[in-house]
């Protein structure tokens, strides 16, 4: 006669893992891994607008007129000439390096049915970003308590 195998205490103490138990364990591990980590702010705070806005040519011209002190008619002619030459240079595929603006590098040029599309990137040095900060930016105005 053959002996039937007997269960040892180790065999009876471990419960069997079912598919539901494995899923619950996996979800628990995923929840622990999904906790966000806090990253320290960079040395230079880049202003990020809460809402993306568009600077219209009229507003741009107003800012240039105010900053330069030139008459509006003269500023308009200069702004139009600068924008036309900048657009033409980009259309020709030229990289443009204008220190107050930064370096504009062409990534791609493509033709659309009604437009020439220029995909470019602008690289500004940290010094240019710092120099362009003005007290009129919302983040700095809210922080002022010197009243």
Image (cartoon, rainbow, N blue to C red):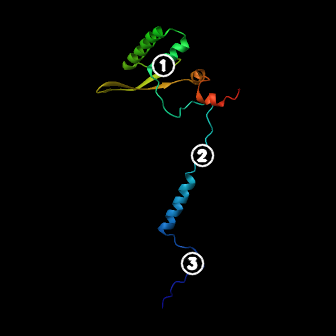
Q: Earlier in the sequence, mark 3 or mark 2?
A: 3
- State the residue at coordinates (50%, 17%): 62
Kindly report the distance in space between the C-alpha atoms of the residues bearing marks 1 and 3.
79 Å
Q: Name the quarter where the C terminus is drawn.
A: top right
**Which is nearer the eye, 58 or 14?**
58
SS at circle 1 = helix
Q: Is residue 97 left or right of residue 130?
A: left
* Residue corresponding to mark 2: 37
* Residue corresponding to mark 1: 60
Tag nearer the camera, 3 or 2: 2
Tag nearer the camera, 2 or 1: 1
SS at circle 3 = helix
Q: Residue furthest left?
A: 113
* Residue corresponding to mark 3: 12
Please tell me whether residue 140 is drawn above or below residue 28 in the rendered image.
above
Kindly report the distance in space between the C-alpha atoms of the residues bearing marks 3 and 2.
42 Å
Residue 26 in the image: x percent, y percent? Answer: 52, 60
Dot 1, crowdedness within 10 Å: few (<14), some or many (≥20)? few
Residue 129 has which mark?
none
Q: Residue furthest bottom?
A: 1
Q: Earlier in the sequence, mark 2 or mark 1?
A: 2
**Which is nearer the eye, 138 or 39?**
138
Residue 46 in the image: x percent, y percent? Answer: 57, 30
Q: Is residue 130 visible?
A: yes
Residue 84, by quadrant, is: top left
Residue 127, by quadrant, is: top right
């Amino acid at each position: 006669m053959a002996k039937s195998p007997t269960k040892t205490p180790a065999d009876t103490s471990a419960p069997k893992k079912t598919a539901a138990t494995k899923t619950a364990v996996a979800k628990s591990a995923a929840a622990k891994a999904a906790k966000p980590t806090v990253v320290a702010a960079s040395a230079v705070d880049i202003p990020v607008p809460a809402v993306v806005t568009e600077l219209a040519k009229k507003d741009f011209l107003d800012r240039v007129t105010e900053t330069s002190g030139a008459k509006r008619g003269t500023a308009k002619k200069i702004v139009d000439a600068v924008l036309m030459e900048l657009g033409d240079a980009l259309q020709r595929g030229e990289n443009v390096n204008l220190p107050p603006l930064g370096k504009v590098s062409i990534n791609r040029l493509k033709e659309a049915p009604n437009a020439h599309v220029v995909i470019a990137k602008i690289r500004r040095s940290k010094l240019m970003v710092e120099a362009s900060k003005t007290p009129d930016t919302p983040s700095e105005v809210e922080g002022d308590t010197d009243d």
